[in-house]
Amino acid sequence: MAQASTPEEQLESLLLARRHGLEEQVARLREVVADLERRELLLRDSRASVERVLRVGTSDLDLRETELANTLRDVTAREERLRAGEIELARRRSELGAVELKREAVERRERAVSDREERIATREEALMERERSLASLVELAFVPGVAYRLSEIEPTPLASGSNVEVDDAQYLVARLGPSPLPADTRRCAYLIADIAGVRL
């Protein structure tokens, strides 16, 4: 049977156990510190990465904001040009409409003038025809015979070479001329005997 240990041995054994426990705690603390240091290093790396990402993101955001501002200016300028073009187009359409209205008015006036000219030409032709008809109406005849005599006849349209009957005798119109009487505006036929038309 083993003898009971002395108090010194018990104290030494207790101290050894306590030392062993403390060494284990120190080892665990060292592991914890090392783990904390690794985590702190990872945290610093992560923070640096995040800062780099933020810097890159901020730079990219600034660049995109600049591009967006430039695009907005371009769009605004294009809208201004488009509005100016629309205003110019409206002005040209208005001018074109005015020109079309003027052209239609001119065409209507030209048609009216043409119609009026045609009516005037028709009236002039009718007047000329009437004048020719009136001018060719003969109311006097200078009749040959033993002595020339001036006879009044029914107003008849005659021409040089026409046959005319005066007092039941046939004559030829030698020429047409004014009345030999002063201040007489009537036409006169100067006749010659129509030998072919002499009655047997």
Image (cartoon, helix red, strand yellow):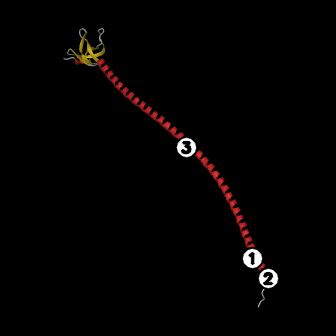
Horizontal relation, residue 171 to residue 124: left or right: left
Q: In this orientation, which residue lies closer to the viewer: 14 or 68?
A: 14
Q: Looking at the picture, which amino acid does disc 2 mark?
A: Pro
Determine which residue is flagged by label 2. Answer: 7
Give the foreground label among 1 and 2.
2
Q: Are marks 3 and 1 in contact (CB under 8 Å)?
A: no
Horizontal relation, residue 161 to residue 42: left or right: left
Q: Position of residue 75 (x, y in %)?
A: 57, 45
Could you classify mark 2 by the number of other residues whose Cα lies within 10 Å: few (under 14), some (14-19), or many (20 or more)?
A: few
Determine which residue is flagged by label 1. Answer: 21
Quadrant of the rendered image containing residue 53: bottom right
Give the foreground label among 2 and 3.
2
Determine which residue is flagged by label 3. Answer: 79
Could you classify mark 1 by the number of other residues whose Cα lies within 10 Å: few (under 14), some (14-19), or many (20 or more)?
A: few
Quadrant of the rendered image containing residue 131: top left
Give the Cα separation between the discs numbered 1 and 2. 21 Å
Q: In this orientation, which residue lies closer to the viewer: 9 or 174?
A: 9
Task: Give the vertical position of 86 relative to 118 (above or below).
Answer: below
- Residue 164 in sight here: yes
Q: If you read the primary sequence from the N terminus, does the residue marked by circle 1 or circle 2 appear first?
A: 2
Q: Looking at the picture, which amino acid does disc 3 mark?
A: Glu
Q: In this orientation, which residue lies closer to the viewer: 15 or 137?
A: 15
Toward the right, the furthest residue is 8
Q: Are marks 1 and 2 in contact (CB under 8 Å)?
A: no
Could you classify mark 3 by the number of other residues whose Cα lies within 10 Å: few (under 14), some (14-19), or many (20 or more)?
A: few
Q: Position of residue 178 (x, y in %)?
A: 31, 13
Element at label 3: helix
Element at label 2: helix
